[in-house]
Amino acid sequence: MKHSYVGEDGRLDFKGLLASTLFWVPLTILLIWLEVVAVRHSGIQDNPRVDAFLGKYGLLGIGIFVWFVDMLIVPLTVDVVWPFVLGYPAWQAVLILALPSACGGYCGYWIGRLLQHIPLVGRIAGKLSHSKWGPLMVRYGAFGVFLGALTPIPFTTVSWTAGMLHVDPKSTLAACFIGRLLRMVVYLVFVYLVA
């Protein structure tokens, strides 16, 4: 399923986005469930190295990993951490995934803003207004970041793009935190139901 829900002019096909979300969210939850089953059956939780890492770094280590994943454009997702937070109370699991994720997205916003000071990047960023995510940010602003935080729209990419296009920082901050918190609560409900 490709990103056909974003038009060249940045208009969102909300029905397409909803369909994509309804496709990817259950698929992601299924993959998280399979990951939980695999982790439980593999005995990795009994591995002394994993136990030592979680014992030494615990929630802080998980939070730092989540922060980096959502700050930098890397081929990882915060969803891979779910098996390691299921042992914590639900509210801690949500907060340790949502808060560092939102902070990572907001730091990504500032990375985008700072990259403007590099001439080559500034010229490339000027072309962003004609790319896929640029028109989305121009048209929807922080609401586009909120959608990226909540739906299959790539959160880190839209956060960087929002920074490069100077979307309002306060609105972007709110969009990051509200969107990521809502996403983690939804995932938590389903992950705890199936795990």
Image (tube, rainbow, N blue to C red):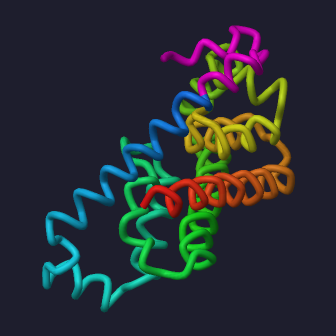
Write the start and end of the magenta stretch as one range: 1-20
Count the labels in the image. 0
State whether the magenta stretch is mostly helix, strand or loop. Answer: loop
Position of 123 relative to 69 (above/below): above
Give the percent coordinates (x, y) of residue 117: 63, 43
Task: Say whether residue 58 is magenta.
Answer: no
Residue projecting furthest to the bottom: 56
Give the percent coordinates (x, y) of residue 38: 23, 57
Position of 33 relative to 23 (above/below): below
Quadrant that contains the C terminus: bottom left
Give the percent coordinates (x, y) of residue 149: 66, 46
Position of 158 relative to 124 (above/below): below
Taking depth in this image into account, of 104 and 125 the one nearest to the observer is 104
Place residue 165 in its image quadrant.
top right
Give the percent coordinates (x, y) of residue 59: 46, 81
- Direction from residue 178 to residue 46 in the image, left or right: left
Taking depth in this image into account, of 7 and 163 the one nearest to the observer is 7
Taking depth in this image into account, of 42 and 124 the one nearest to the observer is 42
Q: Which residue is at a point 18% across and 64% down the rendered structure image? A: 41
Taking depth in this image into account, of 147 and 112 the one nearest to the observer is 147
